[in-house]
Amino acid sequence: MAHNDIEIDPVLNALGPVGIFACLQCFLYFLGFIPDSFLLFSYVFTAQDVEHSCAALQPNANESLIPELSSDWLNSTTVLYDRCSIYLTSNISGDVITKDYPCLYGMQYEEPKETSIVSEFDLVCGRTPLAGLTHTIMGFGTGLGSFLFPWLSDLYGRKRVFLSAVSLSLALNLVNGFAPGYTMLVVCKFFLGFTHAGIGLVSVTAGVELFPSSKRALFSGFFSTLWWAMCIASLAPLAYLLRSYSWRILQLALSWGPALVLVLAIFIKEPVRWLVANGKIDEAEEVLKQAARLNRKDPQSILHVFHSLSRHESEPPLLSVNGEKHPLPGETTAKEEEKQGPRSSFFEEGEGHHQKDWTGSVEVLEEKLSFLDLLRHRLLRKHILLSVFIWFVDSLIYNALYLMSDQMALDLYTSFFLNSLVEGASCILMVFMLSRFGRKPTLVLFHIIAGIGLIASSVCSHYKDVSGVHITGTVVSLLGKMGIGGAFNTMYLFTPEIFPTNIRNRALGTSSACATLGMMISPYANILADYAIWAPGAVFGACCALAVLCLLALPESKDRELPQTTHDVEMWYNDVTSTKKKYRCCERSGQEESDYELYQTK
């Protein structure tokens, strides 16, 4: 039988769907959320705006830069040192002359200069976009990493790539804390974004693969979302405690996250799904033995379940006709197989070996999928194109709302903390919706909540001078944050579920890579708000409506085992089509459903 034909869910259920082993492995992989969240949102505090104004003329300075400040004119000139300009009003012989100059004598900050990269590198006034550029460059690095790391993890395994990304993150975080200038800072941000993709995407994929379909929503959905929100929330009090120190101290303090993951790396194992999909049966058996011992199960019984789960070793689906069972066309029973001779062994390797599927077609032993298969295969192409747009929308809104925390009616630290809390609250609604209604209704509801909240926020921003409206705007903005947080986190669960195993992480990586375009644009939402404070909420609300339309075209993955091959994905649509045709046929004939049993692959 083909290695990727093994159904993994029964093995995981035999181990215990919420056994100690699966929970421990999930926890270890999800520890990567700590450095991942710190990488993504430390910008909010290390690049926070610092009140500033043009520096005044200092003694012994070159007064010729502004002639009106010379000793001859000084007594008749009024000087105003504003945020980005020096305004002079001179009264010369009754003539009032007003002039303005840029900050020719440097900048003066209300906080120590090393408080933020904005103040240390003078990223103000005409250089303001350079502060957002650091986050944009990090997003560009994340995009490249989203293509590379998932490909590497599909090829070499989740564990190796995950730990490599964490190690790079630790080293780069330390270098970033000692960056001597702006250029070095930007280079570090690029590579930190690169590792951000490796940590986040691989840990999410591994978390999805550790549990059977009945428990994925609870553990890979609810607990991962709650833990992610807690990791983000922990950044606010840490930044508050270190607010009186240099941004470099905060940057170095964040190194404890990847260091903790590396200390516990010895306990991390490769997910069984990846091992089986890539023909590493001996390693899969060893992991299953360790899992059985930890879960207090008999290892031999678990291996027996593992070895028996072959579509070719089990009885094929039967057609019921007049009370008698007959094999479907192209199928044989076990007794007939004995007459035909033994089948190829499960452990038989080689690219030249072929096997029959249920319809009698031929497929290769192991399905090797390349990145181009995402575009060649019509269903995978549909999935990936719709997925990348939804990811772009969610990433743009999600990141922008965190970066715009200072626009709320509260201080930066409180606003950021509240944003993370409402994201955590969204996971409660998420787990209820996922288990009861499925992935698509949950995503649609969250995008509708986000759209309504953000549009209402833009309306409140337009009338912010009215008493009480600013507070109302903050409340509905938090509602929008809860919606988009729930939607974005649900996409991390939903996207891996609609792609085959050997291309799953690359599909997730491609979606995330395209989403980084939204991450790259998000820092400039603050600049847009300076021109029209209502504009970001209006744009975000419209994007949520488009995302809902895209979701309606995707399949539902609730209670389905993760697809191992493209054939499994096709069967999802075939099952739905067959069921609809059967229903219409019965409706026209007015008869009850016959005893024809529709076959479902999983």
Image (tube, helix red, strand yellow):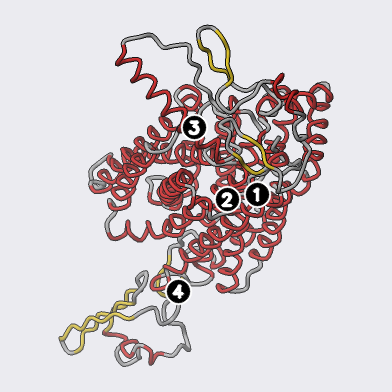
Q: Residues within 10 Å of mark 4 (few under 14, many from 20)?
A: some
Residue extending farthest to the top is 323
- Asked whether disc 1 touches disc 3, contact meaning CB atoms under 8 Å apart, the reply is no
Q: Nearer the viewer, residue 217 or 57?
A: 217
Of marks 4 and 1, which one's residue comes earlier in the chain?
4
Q: Earlier in the sequence, mark 4 or mark 3?
A: 4
Q: CA distance from mark 2 to mark 3?
A: 21 Å
Quarter location, residue 176? bottom right
- Identify which amino acid the numbered label 4 is placed on: Met
The residue beneath circle 2 is 506
In this image, 228 relative to 403: left or right?
right
Q: Which residue was labeled with disc 1?
A: 154
Q: Tell me residue 337's x, y (percent).
A: 71, 24
Q: Amino acid at mark 3?
A: Trp
The residue wearing badge 4 is 107
Which one is in front, 285 or 146? 285
User: Residue 411: in sight, yes or no?
Assistant: no
Residue drawn at the location 47% of the way across and 42% of the way down: 488
Q: Quadrant of the N terminus?
A: top right
Disc 2 to disc 1, C-alpha distance: 7 Å
Q: Are marks 4 and 1 in contact (CB under 8 Å)?
A: no
Give the label on residue 424, or none: none
